[in-house]
Image: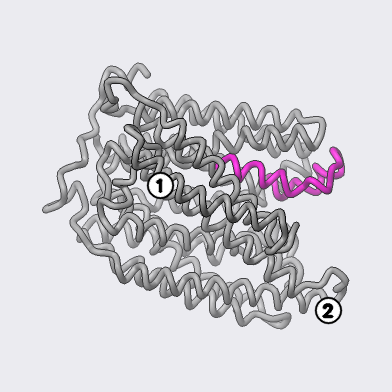
Amino acid sequence: MPVTNVRRTLLGVMLAMLLAMLDNNIVGTAMPTIVRDLGGFEHISWVVTAYTLATAIATPIWGKLGDLHGRKLTFQASITVFLLGSLLAGAAHSMAQLIEFRALQGIGAGGLAAGGFALVGTLVPPRERGRYQGMTATVMAVGVVGGPLVGGFVTGHLGWRWAFYVNLPLGVAALIWVQLLLRLPAPARPSRPRIDWPGITVLTVTIGSAVLAATWAGTTYAWTSWQVLPAWAVAVFGTAGFVLVERRSPEPLLPPRVFTGHRNFPLGVGLLAAVGVVMFGSALYLPLFQQTVQGATATDSGLLLLPMMLPVVLASHLAGKVMSRTGRYKVFPVLGTLLLTAGALLLATMDTGTSRLTAGCAMALLGLGLGFTMQMATTIAQNSVGLRDMGAASAATNLFRTLGGSLGVAVFGSLFARAVPATAAGEAYRQAVATGTRHVFLTVAGVCAVAFALALLVKEVPLRGGPGGAKTHQPVTPSRDEVTG
């Protein structure tokens, strides 16, 4: 497929992925208005938890369905589910309804993430993927920075319901774009495709327990409470049970071969889990520090994230160009995790007197590290599996990034709660928030140091689609099934 056509096709895919990336940030900005209208303040955390939980559970299921039944069809189905959830959430008349419809949105969002990255892996061989990494990084940056800006605008001028309705025109445009431009080879379906219901059941219980434990621990309940400890136990034993179920399944949801085929896949997944920790922590606690300690408004804090997000785009674009030209890539996650560690350590020194310029410089290091690590880790993981497992592998990378972020936020919430007493006010509250932020980013630095060790273990093997690369990446040519489907 010519480069121009690939870019046109990927724009539609990226537009759909942008929906999921914008959504949480837009809704977060609108939440105070939503609570004033619907009430139910005691359930406010479930508006986010229901979405995150549903996304994590649905991601591997969508990925496997794409491998079995075609990635175009399942991607369009996930967009449709997300739009239905958005429409219903915007029309909700109670907090309970909103939580239910947010869960439906989350189910669709799981397919947007898994399907989007799987389509990139299908359309573009790893050696050529560097040409398009800038597009993916730009979409992620727009999602993080644009979310608060869009959320503040639509809530202030159109009402909180438009925080959900704004998804509808974008989603319909993505559906039409994908239908008209996306052409894929017909999937190599088994003669009798089987759905791995035991695997889905065990994984749903396991992920649900892990996300609930991560959400509750240290904030809603104590880490050693009777609500949290059993949830962790179910998550641990569920993981072991899921491995056993998948080894016996004729068509496993997450095939064990993707984890055992080459050491680069689990290493790439580990790097992405660390990226999730950095992204969730930064998106949650940097705006809080900027607003509480540095006096920024909610809209300003979105703009103040630009020193972190612009380097993400630039570094990702540079790394992609070099990878496509030379086929070398290990240096980037090594350098990236080193920059992440340095940036997090600098952010761990912030106090009430830290200027925006100083904080911005530290955030720029964090952004460079994310740009060098994030997309490259995905490429490393996808290059380690065959095309038939691309959906499951892409789902696994997104799943572990989400779980990494969720577990990180659980730890951060506990650290922050200890540093910020409920009775703190005025200057004491500002000082406590600064202390809590330091503890958060010191922990982030430790995670990034572990990620640096993982990056050193990556084995640089030839990328598919380049000279000397593996020839397992099937050519992307139109097929009647996919053209009509």
Residue 52 lies in the magenta-colored region: yes
> Disc number at residue 467?
none
Tag 2: Cα neighbours inside 10 Å, few (<14), some, or many (≥20)? few
> Disc number at residue 243?
1
The region drawn magenta spans 27-55
Mark 1 or mark 2, which is nearer to you?
A: 1
Q: What secondary structure characterizes most of the magenta part?
A: helix
Tag 1: Cα neighbours inside 10 Å, few (<14), some, or many (≥20)? some
Residue 33 vertical position relative to residue 266 in the rendered view, above or below: above
Name the one closer to the observer, 465 or 441: 441
Q: Amino acid at mark 2?
A: Ala
- Viewed as shown, does residue 478 lie left or right of 316? left
Name the one closer to the observer, 72 or 44: 44
Residue 364 location (% of width, % of height): 51, 70
Q: Secondary structure at mark 2?
A: helix
Give the alpha-carbon distance from disc 1 to disc 2, as whole Å. 49 Å
Residue at 64% x, 30% y is 85
Q: Amino acid at mark 1?
A: Val
Name the one closer to the observer, 67 or 312: 67
Instruction: Write down the residue under mark 2.
Output: 428
Callout 1–callout 2 Cβ contact below 8 Å: no
